[in-house]
Amino acid sequence: MDKGLFTGVVMIDLRKAFDVVDHKLLLKKFQVYGLNTNSLKWFQSYLSGRYQKVCVDGTLSEPLGIHFGVPQGSILGPALFLLFINDLPLVLKNNIGIYADDSTLYTSAPTLAEVEEKIRPDIDAVSMWAKENKMKMHPAKTKYSIILTRQKIANSAKQSLDLSVDGMQLTKVESERVLGVYIDSHLTWNKHIDTLRRKLLQRIAILSRARKYIPAKYRLLLYNASIKPLFTYCCTVRSNCSQTNLDELFKLQKRCAGLILDSPRDARSYDNFQKLKGLPVDQLFKLNKIGLLKKVIDVPCDEDLEPLATPEEAEEHEARMTEEAKIERLYQARFTQEVELAAWYDI
């Protein structure tokens, strides 16, 4: 987007993905991956000998052997599925993000026509791969979005992409939920913040009711367990939302601090956060960004993050960290904890 390019994103949906994994095919892939004989026998033993029954009106059916699907609810289930689809990127020319059964194709180009030309063969390749692996794409649930600035789309002659799966046209969406985050076509995060706000209000209502029955230290535990994760989930991605959205979140966070401490409505939020040794949302997001940056610079990272660690950019980040030496020292001192608000205001 910063480079003035159009980005096409296709959110792929595989029909009943976890339930249709072929055990024989999975074991063949393990063999290709280089697992030894004993390991293959162990996985074969783990997957075989499983049966299911159905109860209808109190009548139980005969047991039926299970030869497809990974055991859901198990520790190994997601890992087995990831190993099964591990070869999917090999048939593609463009980028794909895979997390369990959520797969997202994306590519960028100067025009929408070029985006369409680049991404269409990959959609066909995914469909072909699915058929060869005894799976199937779900055209009705596979959607696409175009990410760009409002000015760019207004000046574009083409407003959509002609994409299809098995002859069925894909639906264009302005925003879509990907791994719990609503991504909109202009990356404003308005849809996500609005959804997040509604969830926060529901949980703050629980905290408000609990205030009468539990002391402050347990109200803080309740906040840390059920409310704070909503603020911090994927905050490094969506922290560049508008100041209006940040202000909305900060108001809700101040409300939480007041309920935990049972302080009057006219109490200073600065004092409340200092008592709780917590951070306002904007500083909390900043702390998480610094944590991510530190991991990128200090330790080997995934391919997606490697561009941040190139010598030129690492030099730039190092200079930035020098300017924010206080933040860096505080972060190193309490790597996994929030620092006191007063120290942050001194930066």
Image (tube, rainbow, N blue to C red):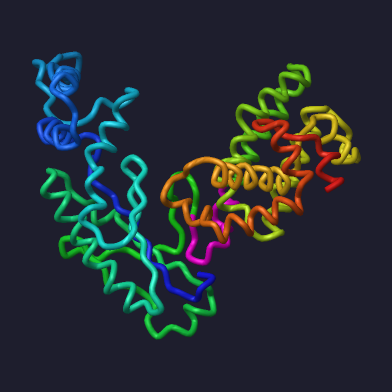
Q: Is residue 316 left or right of residue 322?
A: left
- Tell me what residue is drawn at x 23 percent, y 49 percent: 88
Q: What residue do we see at 18% from left, 55% from top?
A: 127
Please check the rendered image and state whether residue 29 is part of the magenta-colored stretch, yes or no. no
Q: Position of residue 263 (x, y in %)?
A: 86, 31
Find the magenta span and give its range: 183-195
Q: Is residue 117 left or right of residue 313?
A: left
Is 89 rendered above or below residue 335? Answer: below
Q: Quadrant of residue 230?
A: top right
169 vs 161, nearest the viewer:
161
Q: Is residue 279 visible?
A: yes
Look at the image and say whether residue 185 sits in the magenta stretch: yes
Q: With 49 as the anchor, is 93 left or right in this view?
A: right
Residue drawn 13% across the image and 44% down it:
133
The residue closer to the viewer here, 347 or 306, is 306
- Where residue 240 appears, x then y in whole percent? 63, 57
Give residue 326's quadrant in the image: top right
Name the residue rendered at 9%, 20% in the picture.
64
